[in-house]
Every structure is written in structure tokens, then in C-alpha cells.
């Protein structure tokens, strides 16, 4: 039995993530138990943990702090594979410019910055939020990239982007007016700015890899 806990701190519809993980578990022919929960005991008992997030970082961090989610993620990172998605990835950083400036968990070095209202590319204004499909250039090998072609297109929805300070943690880069960290990895945590559960075949491939990943590089 592969037990996967999706941390629920009240921000966003997490069931699409759970359904996608159940689907790839079934494809692998393994028994996969996916639970969407805020319960520290269930999260501690899981083999793998997903740390998602949707919405404004101020509201997300308020709930993360209220429910001690940071402690749950830190504990999980010591012993099991962890996948952070979208605002979950941003929450791992030190600080976000959103909502006038919000301190994050500080598990990774770097900041979350605003694309800006005047974002330009080749003389044309780019829409913010960055919403839709965009390429991810893989900058380092990682087990979660197995079977995922370089420069594959994933689905993004965000107005703020991660600027990693430690480039050795950067495993994927995307360009939208500026280059930004699309994926980060540190020990047994992998973080994505895009939504793998909304990214069709390549997103499912990444989730399939996550279910088989032992947390090592």
C-alpha cells in the first residue's frame, strides 16, 4: 500500500490533485491510498506527502501557521518524498512580495516576486497572471523528470514567481518576460510552480514518478 497525504489547510480544491494521484497509482498497478487531510497523525503516517496551495500567500501563510503545517512539512522532509505545488512551492521560500510582503517558511533560499504590470516581451505587453501552457527547460537531472521530455509544456496559473537564490536547487526554468524557477529540488522535496494535475500526459508522468520516488537523487 502506497499511502499519500495531501495537506489540506483550506486553500483551494485539492481533490483534483488526489484524483490524479489515484489515477497514476492505478496505472502503475499499485494499491494507492490518497487522503486529503489536515490531521498531523495521518500526514505523519503517509509514505509520501503533497503540499499544494492556491490563492493569496498572506491567507495561505496564515492558515499554514495556524495549523502548524510548516512543522508537518519539515517533519515529512526528514524521512519521505514531498511534492510542493504552486503556492506550496512559494511557501517554501523566505519571503514573498505579495500582499505588501509576507514572510514564508524559509525552507529554501530565495524570494517570490511579482511579474509586474508592465511585463513586456518583444515589444508586446504580457498578461499577468501568467496563465496557460509554457515550456519547462530542465536544468538538472532528477528522478521526477524520468520519461518527461525536456522543454515539455506544463500548465501555469500565477502572478508571482520564484527567484531561487541557490541555483543548485533549480531543476527547471520557464521564461515569461523573465526567467523564473519552474521547479526546485532539495534532498527529498521536489517543488513545481506549475500544476502537474492539470498538465495532461507530462503532468501525470511526473506524478507517476513521484509515486515511485524514494526521495534520493
Image (tube, helix red, strand yellow):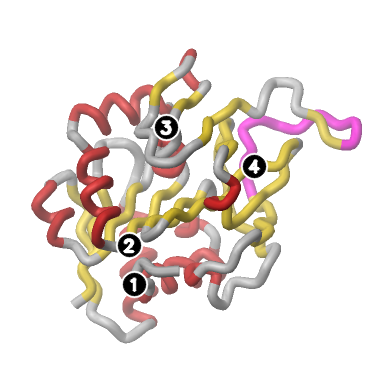
Q: Position of residue 79 (x, y in %)?
A: 24, 61
- Quadrant for residue 213, please give it: bottom left
Q: CA distance from mark 4 to mark 1?
A: 27 Å
Q: CA distance from mark 4 to mark 2?
A: 24 Å
Determine which residue is flagged by label 4.
180
Determine which residue is flagged by label 2.
81
Q: Pointers 1 and 2 in contact (CB under 8 A)?
A: yes
Query: Camera-side residue: 160 or 93?
Result: 93
Answer whether residue 184 is magenta in the image: no
Q: Pointers 2 and 3 in contact (CB under 8 A)?
A: no
Q: Position of residue 130 (x, y in %)?
A: 64, 38
On residue 214, the disc is 1
Give the quadrant of the N terminus: bottom left
Mark 2 surroundings: few (<14), some (14-19) or many (≥20) residues within 10 A = many
Q: Pointers 4 and 3 in contact (CB under 8 A)?
A: no
Mark 1 surroundings: few (<14), some (14-19) or many (≥20) residues within 10 A = some
Q: Nearer the viewer, mark 2 or mark 3?
A: 2
Residue furthest right in the image: 123
Mark 3 surroundings: few (<14), some (14-19) or many (≥20) residues within 10 A = few
Q: Nearer the viewer, mark 4 or mark 1?
A: 1
* Residue drawn where x is 48% and y is 37% of the image: 109
Determine which residue is flagged by label 3.
55
Query: Camera-side residue: 38 or 90?
Result: 90
Amino acid at each position: 500500500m502506497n499511502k499519500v497525504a495531501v495537506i489540506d489547510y483550506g486553500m483551494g480544491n485539492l481533490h483534483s490533485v488526489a484524483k490524479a494521484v489515484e489515477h497514476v497509482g492505478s496505472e502503475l498497478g499499485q494499491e494507492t491510498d490518497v487522503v486529503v487531510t489536515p490531521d498531523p497523525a495521518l500526514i505523519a503516517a503517509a509514505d509520501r506527502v503533497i503540499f499544494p496551495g492556491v490563492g493569496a500567500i498572506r491567507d495561505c501563510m496564515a492558515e499554514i501557521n495556524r495549523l502548524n503545517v510548516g512543522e508537518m512539512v519539515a517533519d515529512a522532509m526528514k524521512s519521505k518524498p514531498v511534492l510542493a505545488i504552486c503556492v506550496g512551492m512559494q511557501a517554501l521560500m523566505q519571503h514573498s512580495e505579495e500582499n505588501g510582503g509576507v514572510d514564508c517558511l524559509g525552507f529554501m533560499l530565495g524570494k517570490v516576486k511579482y511579474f509586474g504590470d508592465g511585463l513586456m516581451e518583444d515589444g508586446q505587453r504580457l498578461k499577468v497572471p501568467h496563465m496557460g501552457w509554457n515550456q519547462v527547460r530542465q536544468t538538472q537531472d532528477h528522478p521526477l523528470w524520468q520519461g518527461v521530455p525536456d522543454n515539455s509544456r506544463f500548465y501555469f496559473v500565477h502572478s508571482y514567481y520564484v527567484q531561487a537564490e541557490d541555483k543548485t536547487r533549480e531543476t527547471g526554468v520557464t521564461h515569461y518576460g523573465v526567467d523564473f524557477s519552474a521547479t526546485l529540488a532539495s534532498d527529498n522535496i521536489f517543488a513545481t510552480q506549475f500544476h502537474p494535475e492539470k498538465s495532461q500526459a507530462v503532468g501525470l508522468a511526473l506524478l507517476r514518478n513521484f509515486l515511485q520516488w524514494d526521495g534520493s537523487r
